[in-house]
Amino acid sequence: MQNTLLQTSTRLARVMAILVLTPMMMAACGHKGDDKKAKTDSTGKDTQTTAVADAPAPPQVDLTPVDTAAYNRKLLFLAHNDSSSKFLVHRDYPVPGAILPFKRIVAYYGNFYSKNMGVLGQYPPDEMLAKLKETCKQWEKADPATPVQPALHYICVTAQGAPGKDGKYRARMPFKQIDSALHLAARIHAIVFLDVQVGFSNVQSEIPLLEKYLSMPNVHLGIDPEFSMKTGKRPGTVIGTMDAEDVNFCSEYLARLVKANHLPPKIFIVHRFTKNMLTNAQNIRLHPEVQFVLDMDGWGPVSLKTDSYRMWVANYPVQFTGFKLFYKNDVRKPRGVNMKETQMMTPAQVLALKPSPIYIQYQ
């Protein structure tokens, strides 16, 4: 209980530090806004019609059939060869072209407008990409049996502390920023995740606006229940929540895109670090077209992070698991915490978790 309360209070303090966009940034936002002005970027171009033209050409689609025997062996490997693990509950195999569990995804997270929201906006592009490549090497060294797939996890809809013109407490990033993420990713053969923080909006309104990008084979989705404010409280004042039906809407939407465009499976990240962030998790429906990852994204001391992973992710093995590491917040020293625990976990420490996370995110 003490750990949970500590994580909640420190998490909220961090949230308040990342919500503010300047008026100039706000003016540039709105990838498909609620008024005519919001539909244009800073050059006056229509972001809806130029988005895909400005993005790099999608990579060639890989539709290699899944080796089911290798798939089973890899799941057992992630479960530390414990055949009784809840993680190994048999489910349908993915459609051809699946990344998971054959590769471990190592992602850098953030928003280009903010140095405080994550590593994507903290460093110049060349430095950030070099840092990501080096981080991927560290994971390949820690687990030589699992190749690493680099990724950029870009927050394209950010929760806000102010209501905005439509009162939704969220800002949609301009399509040109998503294009920038795709161009950067292409330089190191990375995939891209588009992360959505809905504020007072909802996934039913936000996710379809990203269809042009989610229809690309190298673009995947993340949603953050922490910033889904169903209770009417302002983002940053309480931890938000989503229900299994919100998750199912997204999964079904992605599955339809995969079928319609003959794509490899989409990877779908759902963040969680408390029980109430995701209600009715037992009702989440899986699809062969979507690879679901429940990602533990809380920060704090090692014992707190590992406890949160065990309680709210490993105990609810919907499909795959993920783990988030914070370059800054994991090394902060909350009051009353042993200084020896105030460190960022190493790849070896994360791999020792059961099951071993197959998706790693750095903020």
Image: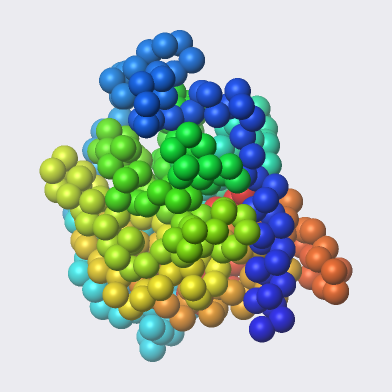
> How is the model colour-coded?
rainbow
Q: Quadrant of residue 55?
A: top left
- The answer to whether residue 64 of the structure is visible from this angle is no
Can you name the residue that lies furthest to the bottom here?
84
Above or below residue 121? Residue 282 is below
User: Is 353 displayed left or right of 212 in the figure?
Assistant: right
What's the residue at 56%, 63% (across, down)?
A: 239
Q: Could you tell me if residue 273 is visible in this image?
A: yes
Q: Residue furthest left?
A: 260
The residue closer to the viewer here, 357 or 102, is: 357
The picture places residue 161, in percent across and down from the top left corner, at 60, 45
Query: Is residue 148 left or right of 133 when viewed as pictured?
Result: left
x and y, in percent, of residue 179 in the image: 42, 26
The quarter holding residue 39 reads top left
- Tell me which residue sits at (36%, 76%) in the image: 280
How far from the left and from the top, in percent, is residue 114? 64, 35
- Number of callouts in the render? 0
Residue 176 on image: x %, y % = 44, 23
Identified at 59% across, 74% down, the residue is 308
Is residue 249 placed above or below 68 in the rendered structure? above
**Which residue corresponds to the image point at 60% horizontal and 23% vertical from the top-left?**
24
Which residue is nearer to you in this view: 359 or 287?
A: 287
Quarter where residue 1 is shown: bottom right
